[in-house]
Amino acid sequence: MSDTPHQRQSAWPLIVGFAVLAVLIAVAGYWAWRQQAQSMQRQTERSLVAVGELKADQITTWLHERHNDAQTLRGDPLLSAAVADMLAGRDARSATTRVQAYFDDFQRNYGYVDLVLTSPNGAVVLRAPNTVSHSVGREAKALAARATTTRRVASSDLYLDAEGQARLGLAAPVLSDAGGGAIAAVILHIDPSRYLYPLIRGWPLPSESGETLLVERRGDQVLYLNELRHRKNTAFKLTTPVNTAGRPAAMAVRGRRGVVQGVDYRGMPVLAAIQRVPDTAWFIVAKEDSSEVLGPIRTRGWLTAGFALLLVILAGVGTLFLWYARESQTSAEIRESEERYRALVDHAPMAIFINREDRVVLANEACLRLFGATAPAQLLGKSPFELFHPDCHPAMRERIHRLRDEGEEVPLIEEKVIRLDGVVMDVAVAAAPFQDQGVNAIHVVLSDITERKRAEDDIRRLNAELEQRVLDRTAQLDAANNELEAFAYSVSHDLRAPLRHISGFSSLLAERAGDSLDEKSRHYVDTISRSVREMGVLIDDLLQFSRTGRAELKIEPVDMNATLGEALEPLRRETDDRDIDWIIGPLPTVVGDHALLRQVWANLVGNAAKYTRGRAPARIEVGADDGANEDVFYVRDNGVGFDMQYAHKLFGVFQRLHSAAEFEGTGIGLANVQRIINRLGGRVWAEGEVDHGATFSFSLPRRKESPS
């Protein structure tokens, strides 16, 4: 039957309404999917960044422990004395036996591949274990030469030895018993496959493709330093050009940081987080395949698109039904359209029911399955409020009023239904108003989202577990710091008694022996006495360092001019005989701990006075600058200065850039400064140039209230 002009004209409002509804459904579906996709990707990016930072911290800690092992060898007077005797031929057999036993114990206890004692020119003197070859490679010789020249611990990069094994080398100089030049060097060879590679390979989160890479730049190539998860025998063999586009490893050495997308060494698209390992030329790349990261997002997108398409189809079906209801001229045509609509609804894969006058008047097969019904009679005639959870009723009343009484559209919503067997299920509910036999009714479409909610719960649980792991790790670090402080405090006290014994008995020995001691023996006694005094100073500094970490802060306004004056008063008495030009600028009042800030000033101006010794006149300048939301203070001098490449060592415990023979000290004062300023929320840094002076600066935040 052909349409009349009146029929075609009356169909236009319905067509326009259907088009608007279809657009709204599509936009709402895309918006919902986009929000979920962005949330999932942000979570994955945070996880990758956390893994990269964790690996970089673990590697830094491991390297620091190895460097401390070498420092132990460098500062051991027993080892220095035995090596000196062995090289000088004084009781050489006994000295060699002592050094060999020392090296064997050290190698076994600390897990090194071997320890090699070399002369300053690189000739092998002794090796532990003694069963291996007595030759060393070119890298080891160069390392030994650098250690003996600088009298400091030297370290190498990762390299392949003559047998093709990955190695990392450290060299500790053996100093003469008087603390002079280096008489030998100890080379420590480390096998990274014992700890470093397993540490890098471990992935803390469930993942089928998660992998951590350790890379560095060598020339115009990116070198992969560790064995890879998806390809064997790659350490030191797999390379890629630095300018390779889209390769996360190449991006790392070119300076990129954070989360990037690219293609890995397999040609697979990946999402990666780039992190530099501090104080090394290494970079950590934590990555996962994009298919694993984005797969769930794409799946959810297809489901959302399918659901939105189904809603559009149902909206079209509803529109068609309304058009037939309005335009059919006979009851037979109306019944035929209703039958078609019912057949379409019955066979639709989504659960559908019609709410008319607060009663279910139609429910399709999918709806029966959703509620666990075996026959339509179990649902027909029920109120929708009987089918939905009581927590959803207030929102349902408002939505029913808008749909049925106002004829408004409502957005997609998540609610809970109660099956006939009492089981509560999560569903997505879409509803639209329409006319059913001249009565305002509501077309309701339900979608089971139980699996999606379970997946979201799993993601939240994993996030909570990861956050808990971070909290646990932080708690462990805090506990370890507290234990270290308590240990330093206890050891410092316990060391005083044996030091008093050593000092007393060495004095008695000197008095009793008198002139019978030869020059060498008297030198030994003087060395013991001097070492006891130095140890006493070191213990006092350790106690001060321990108290600084444990002392309760007393936050109050502090006049920095008066505090500096208190710190300068004893120093000026000590330096009355020196030509020092003091330049003191005006200093602002800050909020902090008066006693601790006095200690900061005492350490900084004391350092300036010490390292300008020999300058005539010495020039020491103290002043302050305005920073962004902070006050910046500085102490500048024209003393011996330092090399900026070692600036990162200035504030470490026992880290000194000048020997004790040149300038006295224990290497704890600047560490105390950093600890105090950090506790007050500030920061510390230094700038200098060899023989052209140094500037030590610290900042304190501007605040009105005391920190909790």
Image (cartoon, rainbow, N blue to C red):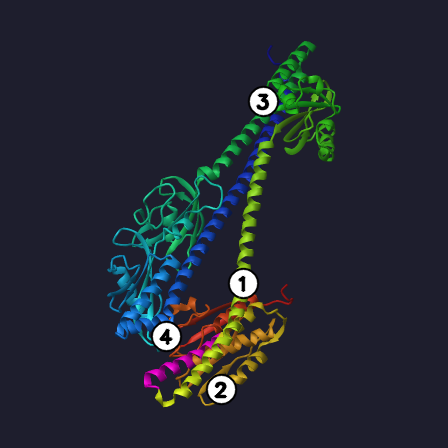
Mark 4 vs mark 3, CA separation in Å: 80 Å
Q: Earlier in the sequence, mark 3 or mark 2?
A: 3
Residue situated furthest right in the rendering: 357
For disc 4, the marked residue is 690
**Mark 4 vs mark 1, CA separation in Å:** 38 Å
Q: Is residue 101 left or right of residue 395?
A: left
Q: Earlier in the sequence, mark 4 or mark 3?
A: 3
Dominant SS type (magenta):
helix
Task: Tell me the magenta residue range.
Answer: 517-538
Q: Are marks 3 and 2 in contact (CB under 8 Å)?
A: no
Q: Is residue 191 above or below residue 564?
A: above
**Circle 3 or circle 2, nearest the eye:** 2
Q: Position of residue 86 (x, y in %)?
A: 28, 71
Q: Which residue is mark 3?
A: 349
Name the residue at 59% across, 31% down: 25
In the picture, the quarter occupied by the N terminus is: top right
The amino acid type found where label 3 is placed reads Pro
Q: On the rendered structure, is 688 left or right of 223? A: right
Q: Is residue 600 above or below residue 579?
A: above
- Taking the magenta stretch, the answer to whether it contains residue 524 is yes
Earlier residue among tags 4 and 1: 1
89 above or below 481?
below
The residue carrying mark 2 is 574
Badge 1: how crowded within 10 Å, few (<14), some, or many (20+)? few
Name the residue: 59% across, 20% down. 348
